[in-house]
Image (cartoon, grey):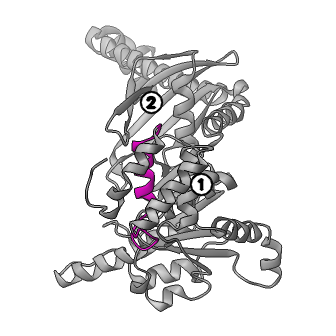
Amino acid sequence: MDLSKSLSESDGTVSGMTSSVFNEVLKSNPYFAAGGGLMLLGTGLAVARLTVMKGATFVTRQMLVDLEIPSKDKSYLWFLEWMAQYKHRTSRHLSVETNYTQHDNGAVSTKFSLVPGPGKHLIRYKGAYMLVTRERSGKMIDMTNGTPFETVKLTTLYRDRFLFPDLLDEAKKLALKAREGKTVIFTSWGQDWRPFGQPRTKRLLESVVLDSGIKDEILLDVKDFLSSGEWYHKRGIPYRRGYLLYGPPGSGKTSFIQALAGDLDYNICILNLSESNLTDDRLNHLMNNIPERSILLLEDIDAAFNKRDQTEEKGYTAGVTFSGLLNALDGVASAEECITFMTTNHPEKLDPALLRPGRIDFKKLINNASQFQVKQMFLRFYENENELCEEFINKFARLGLNASNVSTAQLQGLFVYNKRDPKSAIEMVETLKNPNTHQF
């Protein structure tokens, strides 16, 4: 390296001399030159990579659109049900949903449904491809039932975003069609109402035989309430109505409510007040978020608070308090446009505060089988057998059987056992005298 030559070629200033020496070092030192090249190359690659990433992100934001459906949303189950039946899809991850039903005769029927499981799926909807990602949170869980939160995310081209409402509407119609002509039973699931089992075929009101005039009286009152919304609002009266059906077990209280819901084209929301993790706040939330066109059913209302007293003696307390129930029924935050049915076998155990108007507006005794009911049930099972019906009723009376000791459930059991033989039913009337014997 000839430093003297470099210095002689400079302009004579200190800066010029320094620049000449630096340039000479870079040119004559191969290690230094190689290191500078690598540094420049690395910097260039890093800049290029960052540019590509930002470009890809920009393109993604401009060309793609996402739709997220959380598991708390009603459309979540509708979409999964729709996608399980959708033909134009590619799935590598499936989950099984088992519907297990045990019938009264002991037979068991099982139905398996394969639904999209956690992972990625591809569907083609109206010519547009959509990537479906079902994700399950490993950290966030619902504290009320211990299940992890889930989301379904749909990704497609920005130009096809208008298909999202069409898809969700189609999923909703499919779900409603599956319930058409049926009654859906809802139960509480955390903070939400979820369908319990498969929708049930509507029970005909004529299939429930109550004493003369009772069905018509209740049905007329309910229909009058449903048509009086404006009347309630104009007078500042809370638009809700509570019914109490009381009487011995097996008299048809719950069966009538199910048939009434079918006749009105309503669903049923069953709330168990004895549930261990049910609190006053959750009760209030559930009663204020009942699905549309649904009857709220509180069965065995007396038993819930009897159980509470027993557990308090052992040092435990139930989640729902009696005052919490009263406030949920007619407090400031109570639900509007609500029909509530309560049932009990022991009305004498109910607190007078629960029975006052505004909480329970209509009370009706649903008793054991009267002579009218015996006749109607016999002729319903054995059509046009009027002579045998009279024979059955006469024997029924001779044995001293009356409304105080024979339930309609017992009668139905006798008739079902002899479904095609009314004479055998007459011969077996004596078995009704002791409901604890199982001779049929």
Q: Nearer the viewer, residue 61 or 369?
A: 369
Magenta residues, start to end: 400-420
> Could you tell me which residue is drawn at 44 percent across and 56 percent down?
411
Q: Amino acid at mark 1?
A: Ala
> Could you tell me which residue is drawn at 56 percent across and 34 percent down?
79
Q: Hey, which quadrant is residue 222 in on the image?
A: bottom right
Q: Which residue is mark 2?
A: 15
Is residue 189 something one can see in this rendering?
no
Q: Nearer the viewer, residue 134 or 279?
A: 279
Tell me where residue 399 appears, x and y as whole percent. Answer: 38, 66
Tell me where residue 311 appears, x and y as whole percent. Answer: 22, 78
Q: Amino acid at mark 2?
A: Ser
Q: Nearer the viewer, residue 38 or 283?
A: 283
The image's mark for residue 259 is 1
Query: Label 2's element?
Result: helix
Is residue 43 something one can see in this rendering?
yes
In the image, is residue 221 above or below residue 70?
below
Query: Label 1's element?
Result: helix
Of the 4 image quadrants, the one containing the N terminus is: top left
In the image, is residue 342 above or below residue 163?
below
Q: Nearer the viewer, residue 293 or 79?
A: 293
Tell me where residue 315 appears, x and y as whole percent. Answer: 17, 81
